Structure formats: structure tokens, C-alpha cells
Amino acid sequence: MPISNKNDTSPPISRELLRKVKLLELRTRLQVHDVFGGQYHSVFKGQGMDFAEVRQYFPGDDVRNIDWNVTARMEFPYVKIYKEERELTVMLLVDVSASNAYGTIESMKREVAAELTALLALCALTNNDKVGLLLFTDHVEHFVAAKKGRRHVLRLIRDVLAFQPQSRGTSVSKAVEYALHALNKKSVLFLLSDFADKDYEKAVRVAGRKHDLIAMELFDPREREIPSAGLIPLKDPETDEILWVNTSSATFRKSFIAESAKTAEMRDTFFKSTSIDRIELPIDKPYLMPLIKFFRSRERRK
């Protein structure tokens, strides 16, 4: 069940936090208007058709849309007119586990996740869609039901920027299962995570059948390959376990790369088998091009 309002752990608004929210809104709003606004609208269409009105039948109209009750009263054929149900519910599932507070280049994964959250939330706002937020570690830390409006979107940006999680681990399945219980109609789910987790496949597969699920995988290149830097400690941010490794060893580096590639390939194979869209987002490069590529690819499929 959704977390109640009385358990809301939204961070207080300081001047510094407010400044960050405003700057992030400004930067991402420009991207929405210049790049993504129209593509978002064309890619994520409504979930059905709503009845709008009836009008007189004209040659060429689909006879299956004839309203026989009105036709009988008016003694002339009338047809039902439908319009697309445009309004969507968008839910942003954002991983705030300890492994997402990692980055060796310029940005942490969580910082990039915050920018993506702002971008997607503003896309929803621009298209008059409802948007909500779910922050998770190895349990659901924070949930905000989907609503409309700029003030609501700014609240979501604030939350993802400043929320302090209580746990360090990762459970994608718990986040997805929570969203399944919280959402009562088909929605668009953006799942932002590094997927440093196991046994989430069943929950994700179910969510992909019920909703339009897009997996957005954030990763640092150093998580997939490692330079020659001598004897160094590798620390698991979620367990604090430290392992000393000799990165000068070509055998070790080759094994590290092979294992990382195998994990990435297995993840890719899983998402392809479920027909769930997956976007790889290396945090050492601008995220605009992978997103543009995704939107264009999806638009062609539509």
C-alpha cells in the first residue's frame, strides 16, 4: 500500500536546496522545449479512446460507430465520435541506494538520476500528464502519488535531490511490486537504477506486461573496466566490504572486464526477451544522445 502522508519524509527547503531545484528546473526545461517535448507526446500516447459526442452520419464514416439509440430517435443515422484519452500517469522509480552515490568522473549516478527525473517530470508537465515519484533502496523509502502542476513537479525535483535514504542496499523487485500495487491503471514507468541487484526479473516482467516500463540503466565506465593502478582497495558501497586487488595484473583486468561484460549482456538479453525498452546511460557522457536515440527508435516503431 502507498506510504501515507503522515510518513512523508520530504526534506526541508533550505536556500541552497531551493537554488539547486531552480537551476535544475531551468536547465532541463530548456531541453524539454528544444528537444523532447514533441517526441514525448508522440511516443507516449493515451491509453484508450473516450466518447466525445454524436453527429450526423456522413458517407465514409465507419458504420460500426452508428449510435442506434440516437438514430432511432432522430430518424437519421448518427455516429459516435471518440477522442484519444491523452492524459497519462507517469511514475518515476529512482534508485537511491549507496551504489548510486558513486562516480569517478564528474558526476555521481544519483546526480544524473536527479537531472533525468527533472527532465521526465517536466516532459509530463508540459504534456499535462500526471507524474509521481518512488525512491527506493532495498525497500521503498519514499512515495509521492502522481499529480499535475509545476509546484508538484518542483517538489519531486527537490525530493530526489535531497532525500536521505535510511538503507544502503538495492531491491528493484520491491520497488516494482510497490508500484504495481499503487497504480490502478496502465501507466508509464521509468525505472532509473544501476541494477546492482539480483532476482528482480519476475517482478519486472510482470510490470512490463501491465505497464509501459522503460529501464534506464546508469553506470560508471570504471564499473566495467579498471585501469592499471597497482594494489588498490575496492569497496562495496552497499555492504562496506573491502577487497584488495592487484590492478597491475593483466589477468585480473581481463577477468574483471569479462565478468562485467557478461553481467551487462545477461541484463540486455533479459530486457530484450521481455520487449522492455532499456536505455544505457554512462555517466561520463551527456545523456541527451542516448535519450534522443531512444525516442527516435520508439517513434519509428509506433
Image (cartoon, rainbow, N blue to C red):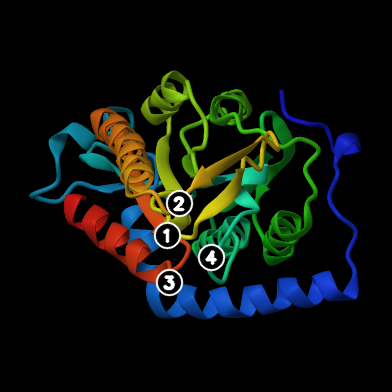
Q: Position of residue 58 (x, y in %)?
A: 14, 51
Query: Which kind of residue does numbered mark 4 sit on?
Result: Leu
Q: Which residue corresponds to the image point at 66% horizontal and 29% vertical from the top-left?
A: 138
**Label 3, residues with CA under 10 Å away: few <14, some 14-19, many ≥20:** few
Q: Which residue is mark 4?
A: 119
Residue bearing the label numbered 3: 286
Q: Amino acid at mark 1?
A: Pro
C-alpha gap between disc 3 and disc 4: 13 Å
Which amino acid lies under the numbered mark 2 shown in the image of this protein?
Answer: Thr
> Where does residue 281 sit, x and y in percent of width and height?
41, 57
- Is label 2 or label 1 in front? 2
Quarter where residue 4 is shown: top right
Question: Please, what is the three-letter code of the amino acid marked with disc 3?
Answer: Pro
Picture residue at 33% right of the left edge, 50% below the top: 250
Front residue of 183/157: it is: 157
Disc ID at residue 297: none
Q: Are marks 4 and 1 in contact (CB under 8 Å)?
A: no
Q: Residue 241: which quarter of the image? A: top right
| Nearer to us: label 1 or label 3 | 1
Residue 292 lies, with reference to residue 242, above or below; the image says below
Marks 4/2: CA–CA distance = 38 Å
* Label 2 to label 1: alpha-carbon separation: 7 Å
Query: Is there a contact, CB below 8 Å, between mark 2 and mark 1?
Result: yes
